[in-house]
């Protein structure tokens, strides 16, 4: 059984990766040639920094040292086109959604309410990066299901 602390630390690790990744992806988008993509990446970077900072506070409030960021994270080899950058951004949001879905399941009260809010925000942000989105964000085992009537 996973503890609340383990789930918070795992979500924090996902946010560390997202901050690093969106910082890197942001450098791949031209504000003059791809203003919509550049703005979406900047917004994602800011949102994930805020989420990360809140998770650091949550872990410290439990009297524990937060998990540290890694020195670097894996990126796709090809990030030379806007479509490749969008796919990498969508994959990052998908990983964060999975972490927040676990956090929703592993917490209660105010922490759960924040986790639900972040899961919803991550799901909405998926639409900033066109591609294949999941009808059940954070639940990859349900990714292939479509709503009835679709």
Image: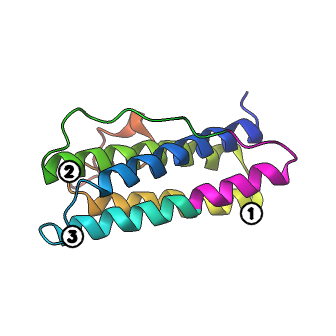
Where residue 63 appears, x then y in whole percent? 88, 47
- Name the N-terminal-most of marks 1 and 2: 1
50 left or right of 2?
left
Residues in magenta?
51-67
Dominant SS in magenta? helix
- Find disc 1 in the rendering and name its residue: 110
**Eyeballing the image, is 65 above or below 127?**
above
**140 in the magenta segment:** no
Q: Residue at x 76, y 35 (%)?
A: 3
Q: Point out which mark residue 131 bears.
A: 2
Where residue 26 appears, x then y in whole percent? 31, 57
Q: What is the distance, in whole Å, between disc 1 and disc 2 at their CAs?
A: 32 Å
Which one is nearer the viewer's eye here, 130 or 37? 37
Where's the N terminus, which quadrant? top right
Count of residue discs = 3
Furthest residue in direction right, as rendered: 63
Neighbours of disc 3 within 10 Å: few (<14), some (14-19), many (20+): few
Which one is nearer the viewer's eye here, 60 or 24? 24
**66 in the magenta segment:** yes
Q: Residue at x 63, y 46 (%)?
A: 103
Q: Nearer the viewer, mark 3 or mark 2?
A: 3
Instruction: Specify whether residue 138 is in view.
Output: no
Secondary element at image label 3: loop
Secondary element at image label 2: loop
Q: Point out which mark residue 31 bears.
A: 3
């Amino acid at each position: 059984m996973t503890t609340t602390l383990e789930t918070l630390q795992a979500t924090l690790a996902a946010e560390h990766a997202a901050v690093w990744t969106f910082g890197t992806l942001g450098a791949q988008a031209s504000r003059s040639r791809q203003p919509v993509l550049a703005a979406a990446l900047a917004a994602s970077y800011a949102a994930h920094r805020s989420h990360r900072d809140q998770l650091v506070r949550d872990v410290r409030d439990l009297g524990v040292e937060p998990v540290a960021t890694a020195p670097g994270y894996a990126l796709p080899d090809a990030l030379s086109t806007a479509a490749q950058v969008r796919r990498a951004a969508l994959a990052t949001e998908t990983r964060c959604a999975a972490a927040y879905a676990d956090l929703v399941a592993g917490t209660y009260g105010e922490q759960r309410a924040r986790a639900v809010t972040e899961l919803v925000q991550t799901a909405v942000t998926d639409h900033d990066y066109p591609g294949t989105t999941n009808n059940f964000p954070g639940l990859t085992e349900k990714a292939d299901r479509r709503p009835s009537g679709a």
